[in-house]
């Protein structure tokens, strides 16, 4: 019930809005669990067969999703706490971001979707052609200061940003 996110056939689920309020394992038990998992994986992988290759890759991708959800749950739990705990102290970036420029990409027919025989999710296939209109991408990610200018300029209240062609 606690860890069932979406499998209705498995049974009841813990209410999603309250999942971040669940307590977590003790700090001592986490490294012990990880060591056990690592030991078992080493034994499995030492068989040196390709039999488990794709399954291990799928498991690693699945585990990455769990890690993302765990971090999200921790941050949600912290956001609900009247003590205002901080997940991680971050030093503000120093200096200026490089000048922002725009890279132009022409419109045309392009292939999208997974290619190759290695791991992919089912929503990445089949590979197919699509017409992609011309577009621009910035030469770098925006800075927090630039994002603040967008917000202060009404970026979230002006529909022209998301309804205009």
Image: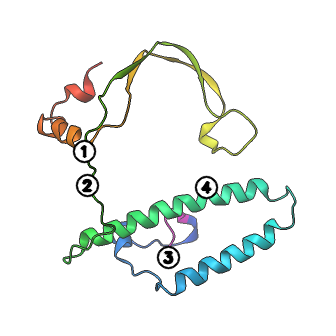
Q: Which residues are magenta?
A: 1-8
Task: Judge left or right: residue 21 versus residue 85.
Answer: right
Mark closest to the chain's N terminus, 3 or 4: 3
Mark closest to the chain's N terminus, 2 or 3: 3
**x and y, in percent, of residue 65 in the image:** 53, 58
Q: Quadrant of the C terminus?
A: top left
Mark closest to the chain's N terminus, 3 or 1: 3
Pair 2/3: label in front: 2
Residue 43 found in image quarter: bottom right
Indicate the secondary structure of the residue bearing disc 4.
helix
Q: Residue at x 56, y 80 (%)?
A: 31
Which of the labelled discs sits on residue 92, or is there none?
2
Which of the labelled discs sits on residue 1, or is there none?
3
Pair 1/4: label in front: 1
Residue 72 found in image quarter: bottom left
- Labels 2 & 1 near each other (Cβ < 8 A): no
Residue where numbered disc 1 is placed: 144
Please state which of residues 3 and 104 is positioned toward the viewer in this rendering.
104
């Amino acid at each position: 019930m606690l860890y069932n996110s979406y499998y209705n056939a498995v049974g009841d689920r813990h209410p999603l809005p309250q999942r971040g309020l669940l307590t977590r394992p003790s700090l001592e038990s986490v490294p012990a669990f990880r060591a056990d998992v690592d030991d078992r994986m080493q034994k499995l992988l030492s068989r040196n067969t390709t039999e488990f290759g794709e399954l291990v890759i799928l498991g690693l991708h699945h585990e990455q999703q769990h890690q993302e959800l765990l971090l999200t749950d921790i941050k949600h739990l912290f956001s609900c706490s009247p003590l205002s705990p901080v997940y991680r102290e971050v030093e503000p970036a120093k200096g200026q971001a490089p000048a922002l420029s725009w890279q132009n990409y022409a419109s045309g027919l392009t292939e999208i979707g997974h290619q190759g025989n290695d791991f992919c999710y089912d929503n990445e296939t089949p590979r197919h052609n699509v017409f992609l209109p011309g577009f621009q991408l910035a030469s770098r990610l925006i800075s927090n200061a630039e994002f603040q200018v967008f917000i202060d300029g009404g970026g979230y209240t002006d529909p022209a940003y998301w309804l205009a062609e």
